[in-house]
Amino acid sequence: PINQIQSYKGMVRLELTNATTVTAYRNTGDVSYETYLKFLVVQFGAAVSVQSGTINLASGSVSTTKTITSVDKTKTILSYLNYETDQTGSHHLPSGPRITLTNNTTITVTRVDTVGNLVIGYALIEFT
């Protein structure tokens, strides 16, 4: 099922925090418009390995990397789970970052601007 969460604070990052809970993280600043999120929870069988987490990209930085447990790139999907930011104000939110599986042990995050600290969510799904 596709569900919906409503937020009044701009960019939102989702995380499956336990077997029955999806948590939405957002800036606690004063952004005054509504954001609606749709999400889908998928459960895989035993033939799948999942690594998930967040990558921090500091204000002023254009890119960063995160080291992961080695995967076979030909059998792996990197899923971008949105980002949250500490930047406030509806007229200058950071542009969305690009997230890529650079090699079998590295995820790279890049962005166009350097506004605000970002926390980027990801899930790395390897079909074994």
Image (tube, rainbow, N blue to C red):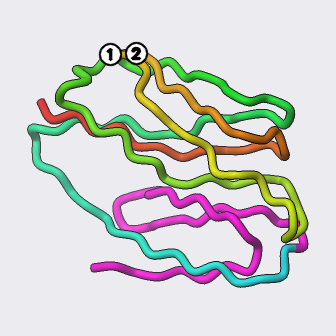
Q: Which mark is residue 61?
A: none
Q: Is residue 15 left or right of residue 41?
A: right
Res 18 → quadrant = bottom left
In the rendered image of this protein, does residue 22 appear above or below residue 36? above
Q: CA distance from mark 1 to mark 2?
A: 5 Å
The reply to whether callout 1 and callout 2 are in contact (CB within 8 Å) is: yes
* Residue found at x 11% / y 48%: 45
Q: Is residue 12 left or right of residue 114?
A: left
Name the spot of residue 106 as percent of width and height, x first.
46, 19
Tell me which amino acid carries mark 1.
Ser
Mark 2 burial class by Cα count in 10 Å: few <14, some 14-19, many 20+? some
Name the spot of residue 50 as percent of width and height, x first.
30, 38
In the rendered image of this protein, does residue 83 appear above or below residue 74? below
Is most of the magenta stretch helix, strand or loop? strand
In the picture, which quadrant includes the N terminus? bottom left
In the rendered image of this protein, does residue 126 appear above or below residue 118? above
* Residue found at x 82% / y 66%: 28
Res 25 → quadrant = bottom right
In the rendered image of this protein, does residue 43 appear above or below residue 3? above
Residue 19 falls within the magenta-colored stretch: yes
**Is disc 2 placed on a helix, strand or loop?**
loop
Residues shaded magenta? 1-30
In the picture, which quadrant includes the C terminus? top left
**Is disc 1 placed on a helix, strand or loop?**
loop
* Residue found at x 62% / y 52%: 83
Q: Is residue 68 left or right of residue 76?
A: right
Res 90 → quadrant = bottom right
Q: Which mark is residue 70?
A: 1
Residue 42 falls within the magenta-colored stretch: no
Q: Which mark is residue 105?
A: 2
Tell me which amino acid carries mark 2.
Thr
